[in-house]
Amino acid sequence: MDYILKGHNFDDEVISLLQLFFPNNIYSRKADFSEIFSDMSVISFLEKNRCTASLYKNGKKISEFCTDILSSDIKSVKRCIKISLFYCFKKVYDIKMPWGILTGIRPSKRIYSMWEDGISDSEIKKVLKEDYLVSEEKIKLAFDVAYAEKNIMEKNDRNSIGVYIGIPFCPTKCLYCSFTSYSLEQYKSKVDLYLKALLKEFEYVEDYADRYNIESIYIGGGTPTSLDEVQLEFLLSNVKKFFKKPVEFTVEAGRPDTITREKLKILKRYDVDRISVNPQSMNQKTLELIGRKHTVEDFINAFKMAREEGHKNINTDLIIGLPNEEREDIYRTFEKIRELDPESITVHTLAIKRASRLKENLELYQMPDLEKMEEFLNISSNFAKKMDMHPYYMYRQKNMVGNFENIGYCKNGRECIYNIKIMEEKQTILALGAGGSTKIVDSKTDRIDRIFNVKSVDDYIGRIDEMIERKKGGLK
């Protein structure tokens, strides 16, 4: 889709609304109509006291909406731009948008920031409903999550940090995946070199980390248990050597086909107290379609094996909206998960990422519409209640099917500290490994400085000294 801006340069606000109503398109800004070549185009026009959005099809105007600007502050202006676009599009495409124009990835963070400004719950609800057009259902969800996060955040130790360690290897790359992950089959010879480079980064940040209380360590990926037993022990022994014992230690065991009894024993030996074993779906046809090289039975066996080895805090990741799945498939998945009784589940709404194989071949698959996704989310919420779980963290991504959300549910006392702290961005997160994004939070001003590691495994191995130099400037 093409768009034209007049009187402003707020591309992000315009594109965020285009993504809601016209997902999975490429959006191109043009100077004027002479450059328009696409069938659909939009003009966003900002005057002194008014904002107008106009939608065109093949050069003919099919919808328009104007809204008055009541305040000159930048937030109000941006909101009016989005409102004009929202109602302009709604005139033609009467699609239910439960999050309204609230397009940020952390809805509960907005509530939290308003609490910090002394705004009451009733006023916040009014703002979300009237200014951002959020539905009552989503307002309630956002508050449920915000209160769960608040219970953790009120115990926040200003001298604490979190540590993220990335292991970017997987047995195979899933259909929907756009993460920094590399096929173990292709990169097997690079794993030891990667761990050697990671160890060098550990050594450098040790002095910095030693000044703080380490609240959480989270080893993610990829699939960390793609490492063999010797490599996994090497990794965890060095984590123990260079970092103080955390309050919470999570390892994404992830793919059931990477889990062995010996690896589960190693995780226990090094005090890992939270693991994630992720089926994504409990439907065999779906697992085969998305490129998972394990069966439903493999997942069940891996989960039970983890219990036998003493793992008492297990999360399972599930994805709703996977290609070709219907209502009965979602029910089947949650029924089987309920039988296993994990301590937490993370329900992801499928996001169609540009770098994924799914995006490249989208026309080959039957994808759920917004109404189906809403039904699927309601099924997951109802099952979470049956499992005595409550929502405790939430985030959204671009290009999510139906513009919905990812939600973490857990039993009381099983909230993942790392997940909450990284969402609220109130704590420094030291990120190590390929693709790591360190966030340095100033506890007095809440300013965030970021230090990025390269994403490529080969670049990380070859440029590890440069990654350390980058950290030298930011870790003080």
Image: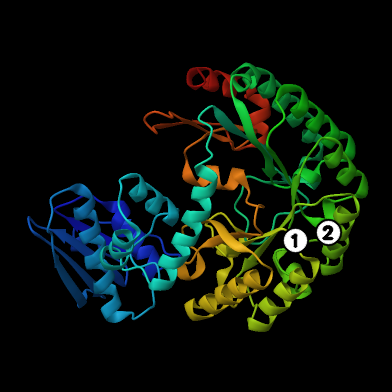
Point 39% across, 28% down: residue: 444
Q: Let me know if residue 164 appears in the view.
A: no
Tell me where residue 302 sits by quadrant.
bottom right
Vertical comparison of 245 with 127: above or below: above
Q: Position of residue 136 (x, y in %)?
A: 39, 72
Q: Residues within 10 Å of mark 1 (few under 14, many from 20)?
A: many
Q: Nearer the viewer, residue 209 or 396?
A: 209
Q: Let me know if residue 194 appears in the view.
A: yes
Residue type indicated by callout 2: Phe
Q: Position of residue 42 (x, y in %)?
A: 25, 66
Q: Is residue 120 left or right of residue 295?
A: left
Vertical comparison of 101 with 109: above or below: below
Point 28% across, 74% down: residue: 89
Q: Is residue 128 left or right of residue 374?
A: left
Q: Position of residue 190 (x, y in %)?
A: 77, 34
Q: Is residue 208 left or right of residue 47?
A: right
Q: Position of residue 234 (x, y in %)?
A: 83, 30
Of marks 1 and 2, the one in the foreground: 1
Element class at badge 1: loop
Q: Nearer the viewer, residue 88 or 328?
A: 328
The tag on residue 385 is none
Residue that mark 2 sits on: 303
* Color scheme of the displayed model: rainbow
Q: Quadrant of the N terminus?
A: bottom left
Q: CA distance from mark 1 to mark 2?
A: 9 Å
Vertical comparison of 377 with 12: above or below: below
Point 68% across, 79% down: residue: 331
Residue type indicated by callout 1: Pro
Tell me where residue 335 sits by quadrant.
bottom right
As drawn, the residue found furthest toward the left would be 48
Residue that mark 1 sits on: 342
- Determine whether label 1 and label 2 are within 8 Å by CB: yes
